[in-house]
Image (spheres, rainbow, N blue to C red):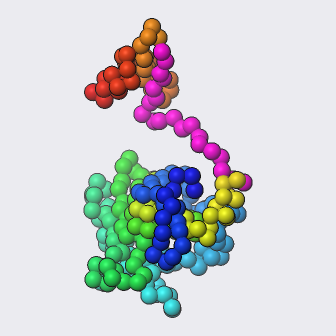
Amino acid sequence: MRFGCEKGTDYGGTQRELINLCVVTYAEDPNNLFFADYFAFSKKDFDDYAPQILTPKSISGIEYTYGERLRNYGGIDQIKDGIITELRRNKDSRRALAITWKVQQDMAGKQPPCIILIQGLVQDGLFHLTAFIRSNDMFRAWPQNALALRQLQGIIAKESGFKAGTLTTISGSAHIYERDYAAAKEIIKNHAQGFRCEFDPRGNFVIKIENELIKTVYQSPQGGYIKEYAGKTAKEVYLQIDN
C-alpha cells in the first residue's frame, strides 16, 4: 500500500503493484498453521481450497486445479516423481521442480495458472521450497497460496526424509486491487508492527565519523570485531568493502 505503483488491470479498475516481491517464511509449522482473524477467508474456506494444491482431484465447475497439474501433468506426478524421487536419489539435485504452465493452452487461455513453478532444494538436511507466482493478489490469494504451499512443503519434506526449511514465494506481479484498499488500510492500522530491525546472520556494520573520516567496523553477528574500513567518502569506503 505504501510503495505499490498504481496502474490499471485486465479486469478494469486499478491496482497497486510491486514487481518481484520476495517473501520468506521460516517458522510456520506445516502441521499447525496460524490463521489470523483478519484473513479474507475462514478456516473452512482454506480447508476447501488446500486440496486444489495438495491433491490431483478434479473439482466440478473448475477448469483445472494446481494439484491436477502438479500431480498429473500429461500423466506425470511431478511431486512424487519430479521432486520426492529425485531428492531421494540425490539430495544435492537442482532438478527437483514442478511446473503448471502449459504453453499451447495457457498463452491465449482465459484462466492461466498464477503459480507457475515450484523448486525444492536441500541444504543441511532442510528441504527449502521456492514458488514463482506470475500474478498474485496479495490481499485475497497470497495467504491461501502460502499456507497451502507450506503444507505441500511439509508433505514433500516428510516423504523425502528431510525437515521443512524455508518457503519462499516470488510474486512477479504482487498487487492489491482497488476494491480491497480500505480493508488493507484497516489491517495495517490495527495490526502492522512497522519495520523491525533484524540482524544479518553474516554480520553487521557500525558506521561512525572520526577525525573527518568515515569509519566502518565490520562485526560478527555476536558483536565481535572482524575488520575496519575508513575513507573520506562513502564511495571510498564502499569500494573497500566490495573488494
User: Residue 103's quadrant in the figure?
Assistant: bottom left
Q: Position of residue 129 (x, y in %)?
A: 41, 59
Q: At 50% from the left edge and 26% from the top edge, which residue is drawn?
A: 222
Residue 83 location (% of width, % of height)? 34, 66
Q: Main secondary structure of the magenta part?
A: loop
Q: Is any atom of residue 154 visible in this view?
A: no
| Identity of the residue furthest to the top in this view | 211
Q: Quadrant of the N terminus?
A: bottom right
Q: Residue at x 46, y 85 (%)?
A: 57
On screen, 2 above or below 199? below
Residue 161 position, x and y percent, is: 40, 59
Query: From the image, which quarter does the C terminus lie in?
Result: top left
Residue drawn at the location 49% of the way across and 58% of the way down: 5
Is residue 225 on the magenta stretch? no
- The part of the image, by quadrant, that contains residue 215 is top left
Magenta span contains residue 199: yes
| Front-lying residue, 210 or 145 | 210
Furthest-bottom residue in this view = 60
Task: Determine whether 228 is above or below 243 in the image.
Answer: above
- The location of residue 143, given as percent across then percent down, is 56, 65
Residues drawn in magenta: 190-209
* Residue at position x 37%, y 16% in the image: 232
Q: Nearer the viewer, residue 242 or 175?
A: 175
Task: Examine the rendered structure and indicate whether residue 220 appears above or below residue 11.
Answer: above
Q: Decide if residue 220 is on the left or right side of residue 77.
A: right
Question: Total marks drawn?
Answer: 0
Residue 124 visible (yes or no): yes
